[in-house]
């Protein structure tokens, strides 16, 4: 996949013997520095809004790039054929605005010391799904660019799929949201 | 229709309006709780006009939107019936647009009647660049929106609804008019979407199938997760739109055809997936899924047509 600047690699431990005291969670207690899952969840709460913001920035960048590409193609295409892609680009910009608001709300709540597992999952899942939709739309609007190695649209297409997987897949986020969501309508109070 | 409107309980409504309006809104909410039959009339008579005249325009916009959102969460039909008459609260007292309703463009040359209109409020109809007030029991081409029978709320807005008036009005008055209608529609969409998402969750956490509640089935849980996220995005976006309206400082939240389409798309996804969660039960009378699905479609269509009128461009 893309994300070549991201230093990701796998670690494997074979025949690695550790004393019991070096194991996280060995006391049966829960806490950020006590058991691994809680620690991981805390880290995800911290990172997911930031990751979502990074994804949102990437989306905006590729939409801007696509618009400049479209405008440079005006000579080769009639105004009518450019109208639909331009409208789609503008439409997805609005969606990115929603994504940015969700991420900023999650970050703001984190800064206030609130528990934001639900908000963080919402931010990441919305942004990563949006990135895939944008990648697909651009692939349809710029077929010659999406297959050109090194082109921004081609690279975004590969990155977008990775966005949907890293830091918790979109499906896991949605399952987590479904479990944690609480209705707030007045009709239910 | 056999559909019974759920009991609207505003006893715990969070009417967090600005301080100067709190007492007036509390009084209105108290009257809303009196009887269900009079709820629409009570909403109609919010009696906030005197206070609005001395309030900053931004306050009026906020109150109009928040009121629509709160009551849209409870009952779209009655909120629509009541609040459209409150739309002119943004207008100057002497404006000839006071009491006017959105005009319709009729199908040119086709005067087959579908529904006689009974109204006591002025309604202006345009067809082929002519306009005239619709008289009592006049016939025009129109279709039922699906709202309960009422004064003009059962008329379908045709393509490119435009307001033609015999009396010339200022551009600023027209902008105020469109803006107030937009605020109401945005509020109703936001409140109704929140409600339908919550209803989907309630249903999925009670309805059992295959030995467990359907919320525990992965396919349903994934959809519920999507619903919550989509609704969060819609709510935040709409609130940002409303706060920006009239201020014009943030281009990302300027009301336009694209922003209207984004809101409409989100509302459609929410309504569709919530109804899908209820499956066959979504069409059972007494549940809100199918009626809300249709009403959100109508509200979304109105929003897109309003964007064609609103300063900021049409698609």
Image (cartoon, rainbow, N blue to C red):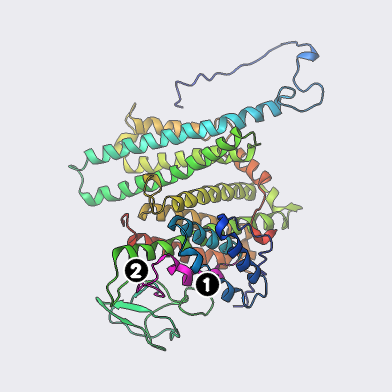
Badge 1 sits on which subunit?
A: B
In the image: residue B84, left or right of residue A14: left
Query: Measured from the top left, where is residue B50 in percent x and y?
Result: 49, 68
Q: Secondary structure at mark 1?
A: helix
Q: Which residue does the numbered mark 1 point to in the structure image?
A: B82
Bounds of the magenta segment: B75-100
Task: Say if the magenta span includes residue B200.
Answer: no
Where's the C terminus of chain B, which quadrant? bottom left
Q: Residue furthest front?
A: B54
- Tag 2, which chain? B
At x 69%, y 53%, the residue is B214
Label 2 crowd (10 A; few <14 / some 14-19 / many >=20): some
Residue ranking furthest to the bottom:
B137
At x 48%, y 40%, the residue is: A100
On the rendered structure, is A73 left or right of A35?
Answer: left
Q: Position of residue B82 (x, y in %)?
A: 52, 72
> In the image as oriented, which residue stretches furthest toward the left?
A75
For the residues carrying marks 1 and 2, which lies nearer the camera in this image?
1
> Does residue B194 show up?
yes
Query: What residue lies at 52% left-to-right and 51% top-to-bottom?
Result: B235
Q: Is residue B298 above or below residue A145?
A: below
Whether residue B193 is visible: no
Residue B170 rendering spot, x and y as whole percentages: 29, 67
Tell me the residue at 68%/26% (across/down): A39
Q: Quadrant of the N terminus of chain B?
A: bottom right
At which x and y percent is residue A160?
A: 45, 34
The quadrant where residue B290 appears: bottom right
The residue under label 2 is: B159
Task: Say which of A60 and A186 sits in front.
Answer: A186
**Helix or strand or loop: what does disc 2 sit on?**
loop
Q: Quadrant of residue A77?
A: top left
Residue B198, compared with residue B36, is above or below; it is above
């Amino acid at each position: 996949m893309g994300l070549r600047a991201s230093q990701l690699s796998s670690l494997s431990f074979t025949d690695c013997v550790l004393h019991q005291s070096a194991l996280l969670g060995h006391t049966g207690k829960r806490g950020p520095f006590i058991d691994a899952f809680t620690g991981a969840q805390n880290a995800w709460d911290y990172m997911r809004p930031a990751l979502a913001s990074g994804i949102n920035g990437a989306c905006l960048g590729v939409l801007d790039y696509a618009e400049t590409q479209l405008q440079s193609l005006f000579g080769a295409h009639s105004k009518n054929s450019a109208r639909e892609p331009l409208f789609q680009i503008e439409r997805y910009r609005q969606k990115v605005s929603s994504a940015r608001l969700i991420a900023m709300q999650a970050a703001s709540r984190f800064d206030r010391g609130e528990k934001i597992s639900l908000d963080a999952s919402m931010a990441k899942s919305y942004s990563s799904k949006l990135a895939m939709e944008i990648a697909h739309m651009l692939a349809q609007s710029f077929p010659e660019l999406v297959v050109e190695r090194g082109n921004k649209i081609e690279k975004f297409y590969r990155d977008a799929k990775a966005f949907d997987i890293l830091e918790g897949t979109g499906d896991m986020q949605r399952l987590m949201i479904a479990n944690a969501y609480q209705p707030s309508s007045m009709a239910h109070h | 229709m056999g559909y019974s409107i759920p009991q609207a309980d505003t006893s715990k409504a969070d009417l967090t309006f600005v301080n100067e309006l709190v007492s007036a809104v509390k009084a209105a909410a108290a009257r809303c709780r009196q009887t269900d039959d009079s709820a629409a009339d009570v909403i109609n008579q919010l009696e906030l006009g005197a206070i609005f005249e001395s309030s900053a325009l931004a306050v009026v916009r906020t109150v109009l939107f928040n009121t629509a959102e709160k009551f849209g969460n409870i009952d779209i039909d009655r909120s629509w019936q009541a609040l459209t008459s409150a739309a002119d609260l943004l207008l100057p007292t002497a404006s000839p647009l006071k009491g006017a309703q959105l005009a319709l463009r009729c199908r040119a040359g086709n005067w087959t009647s579908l529904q006689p209109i009974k109204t006591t409020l002025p309604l202006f109809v345009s067809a082929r660049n002519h306009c005239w007030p619709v008289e009592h029991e006049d016939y025009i081409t129109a279709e039922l929106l699906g709202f309960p029978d009422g004064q003009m709320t059962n008329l379908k807005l045709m393509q490119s609804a435009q307001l033609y008036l015999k009396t010339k009005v200022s551009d600023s008055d027209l902008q105020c008019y469109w803006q107030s209608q937009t605020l109401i529609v945005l509020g109703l969409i936001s409140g109704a979407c929140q409600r339908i998402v919550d209803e989907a969750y309630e249903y999925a956490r009670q309805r059992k199938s295959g030995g467990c509640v359907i919320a525990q089935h992965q396919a349903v849980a994934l959809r519920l997760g999507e619903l919550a996220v989509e609704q969060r995005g819609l709510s935040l976006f709409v609130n940002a739109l409303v706060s920006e309206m009239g201020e014009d400082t943030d281009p990302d939240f300027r009301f336009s055809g694209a922003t209207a389409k984004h809101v409409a798309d989100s509302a459609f996804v929410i309504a569709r997936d919530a109804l899908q969660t209820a499956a066959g039960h979504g069409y059972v009378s007494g549940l809100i899924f199918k009626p809300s699905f249709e009403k959100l479609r109508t509200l979304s269509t109105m929003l897109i047509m309003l964007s064609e009128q609103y300063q900021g461009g049409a698609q």
